[in-house]
Amino acid sequence: MTKPNRTVRQFLQTHAPRTEFTCSEEEKQKNATNKPCLLIVSSTSGGGTAARLAPKVAKRLAQSFDTVILVPTLHREHARTILMTEPLERYAVAVIVGGDGAFSEAVNGMLSRPDGVTVTMAHFPGGSGNTTAGNTLGYWNGSQSLEHACDVICALKTRPMDVLQVDCDDGTTRYATSTISGGIYVDSLILADRYYRWISTFLGNPGLRYILGLIHGYFMYGARDTGREMKYTIYHNNNQDEESFLMPSFGLALYNSGWVLEDARFGSSTPFSGDMSLSVAKTYLGLGRHLMYQGTVKKENGKLDVNKKYPQYKSVHFDRAVTKVKIEPIVVSDSSSIKSCHGPFKIALDGEMGTGNQEYMTGSITAQVLPGKLNVIVAY
């Protein structure tokens, strides 16, 4: 967790460890639910954006719920701990105010509960990246859309959303709601957090650090990194069929296809559940091209032609068929390849750390789809 600024310090002094919000009967809406709302606030998200917006969000939600219980996070992975220990059965919804990392932490906590108890969740946009909020509530900027986003949450319209279960080679299990990323993208995230977070906070642009991190990564690592070879094993058709291929990887992304709004899958008109898509970039420029255009390579005759020569990037998508992907880093012995490789191939979940000890995952992972595992608040 980053060092709190003045806004965050004042927020914690006022609301930690938890604060209850209620409103008068005159302010209470007629269709208000008689169950409370759990409002978890990632205190440092967005350079203090979440802390600044949270009291306003709580007051607005108090008009539609019996009580709003505001719980600020005090340290890294605190959102995970809260969802693992809180009596979720008493709440109508758990709202996460923060970025994608905070929402991912909360999901990991809830799905790791020994008792298996779950609650409907909502992501209010209050961080540097608000992908889940945008793809469910329809709003990415909480400062500009506070009332509208709260209205969507209060309506309590829900849909199921897929979750990616990630089994790691150290025996642990994690969960991702949007993307599993690896390689240069993760390297750039590290640079962004290490060197440019303060600039984003100072200029009031939380996402600026990611752009600066990508630029830094290009000049630091060059346009190509041939020393990191990966083995990909693709399972589809309910694991009845599989295929493997090797290739040098500069970056990769596994996308959760089971979003809930029509524009969630990069312009797809019909979102569908139960599968994922894999994209592998061979060069830095290839990664950029992939991110901009989302190109795909279809299966030929039901099989992926692994010998086909691809352009600078490679994007693999199996229509509604991929249910599991195994990714294994290959130890490279060639001296020239080792020289060109700037470090181990790191993995991140939802753009954040892969583990709770501030270290990214560097070993093999197996990701599989859990269809409709999460119940989320949606706009329609």
Image: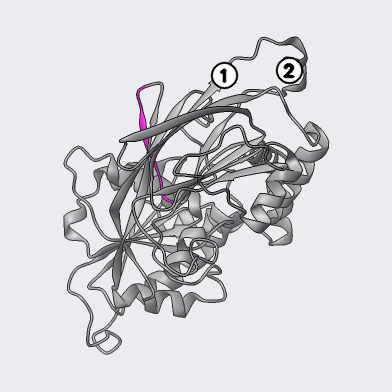
Residue 246 placement (x, y as % from top left): 57, 26
In the rendered view, does 114 fall on the left or right side of 279? Answer: left
Residue at image location 28% in from the left, 39% down from the top: 112
Residue 297 placement (x, y as % from top left): 57, 48
Crowd tier of the residue under label 2, counting other residues whose Cα lies within 10 Å: few below 14, some 14–19, many 20 or above: some
Q: Amino acid at mark 1?
A: Ile
Quadrant in the picture for the C terminus: bottom left
Disc 1: which residue: 330
Residue 114 placement (x, y as % from top left): 20, 37
Q: Are marks 1 and 2 in contact (CB under 8 Å)?
A: no
Disc 2: which residue: 337
Question: Along the line of sight, which residue is nearer the eye, 284 or 195?
Answer: 284
Dot 2 falls on a residue whose secondary structure is helix
**Residues rendered magenta in the picture:** 171-177
Q: CA distance from mark 1 to mark 2?
A: 12 Å
Question: Along the line of sight, which residue is nearer the eye, 109 or 316?
Answer: 316
